[in-house]
Image (spheres, grey):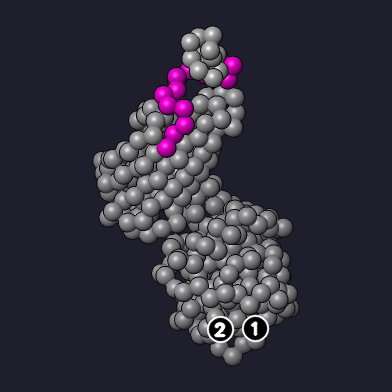
Amino acid sequence: MQRSLVVAGLCVLMLGTVGAEARDFQPLTKSPDRPEMPAPGIGKAALDCSQAIDVSLGDTVCGDTTGLANEADQYCFSPWNETGGEIIYRLVIDTPARIEVSLDAQCDLDVALLASCDASDCLILTDLGFRSSGAISGEYFIVVDGYVGAACGFCLTIEEIPVAPPIDLAGCTNAEFTNCLSQTITGTTCGETNHVTEAACGLFPEQGQDKWYTFEIEPFGYILASANMPNADVSLWVFDDCLTGLECLGFSDFQGVGGYEAVVYSNTSSENKRVHLVVDSFGAAGDCAEFEIDLTCSGGVVPVQQTSWGTLKGTFSTENGGTQ
């Protein structure tokens, strides 16, 4: 299991108290597998930040946790056992900026971002680093801690990065319209364009070429898609229609190369809902691969035009020769 994925997923559910929320941060990348070790319990959480080292955007600072006391053993309510010693940094961002923090350690250290000097006020915990999805400001504490008591030297880089590029609307305007039926779809992202790299509900920058499909989902219906790329690291997005701003409705990228990803979206309204399913991949810019999607979609073929729930019920009423 890739630990950065597990903890980021848990942290997304938590709210920070200063300047940003947990959902505003993403792990930098997927980490290598390493065994899960149960955390010793919430126990130690209050940190002593009186000796916190002030850092600014653009800094690279190096340190060593060897021989330091263990003040906190759990962050973001994660299952990770952080029983090593800590070094705490204080970051104040006066002008809103998008940030990236990366950790280069000689052993198995982790890095947490806190909204205050308390391990339970955690925004994200990763083993390699994190970035904000947009511009943030305020006071934050960055803690370098040791997984299962690890202690060693490290360097931490804090920098400002450009705001993520907007989603290319050509992805949805040129999407392939597909009937909302249970079916298997095979295809390739090769020959496509990278229309979307980051969005609000994503966990990682998805730099591969992407293939877009459009579905019309009936009132109270749903779409469930499971996808696989045998030779690449597939990811899935669900967006609403271009005309309504391409809100990110769903995302999945929890496995590695050859793994399966799944997303589900339910239309809870009484009107037809047009959504876009996007097949993407994690990896180098411009990567592409063949894929297969197992699709479950309620309601069969749905008319493209908006249709009221009453009209749809009437279509299948006994008065029209249908069945109830």
Quick one: SS at disc 2? helix
Q: On screen, 160 above or below 239?
A: below
* Res. 183 visible in picture: yes
Which one is in front, 250 or 71? 250
Task: Name the chief secondary structure element in magenta.
Answer: loop
Residue 248 painted magenta? no
Question: Going by the image, does 229 lie left or right of 129?
Answer: left
Q: Residue at x 45, y 23 (%)?
A: 302
Question: x and y percent of residue 171 in the render?
Answer: 39, 35
* Res. 49 visible in picture: no
Q: On screen, 159 above or below 98?
A: below
Question: Going by the image, does 156 lie left or right of 96?
Answer: left
Which one is in front, 307 or 89? 307
Residue 300 painted magenta? yes
Stretch of the chain drawn in magenta:
296-312
Question: x and y percent of residue 40 in the render?
Answer: 63, 77
Question: x and y percent of residue 197 in the render?
Answer: 43, 48
Q: Choose top left, top right, bottom left or bottom right for residue 42.
A: bottom right
Q: CA distance from mark 2 to mark 1?
A: 9 Å
Question: x and y percent of residue 133 in the render?
Answer: 54, 52
As drawn, the label of residue 302 is none
Residue with the most extreme bottom position? 67
Give the residue type that dot 1 points to. Asn
Q: On screen, 93 above or below 38?
A: above
Q: Residues within 10 Å of mark 1 (few under 14, many from 20)?
A: some
The residue that label 2 is drawn on is 149
Q: Residues within 10 Å of mark 2 (few under 14, many from 20)?
A: some
Question: Going by the image, does 79 lie left or right of 206?
Answer: right
The residue that label 1 is drawn on is 70
Q: Residue at x 50, y 70 (%)?
A: 127
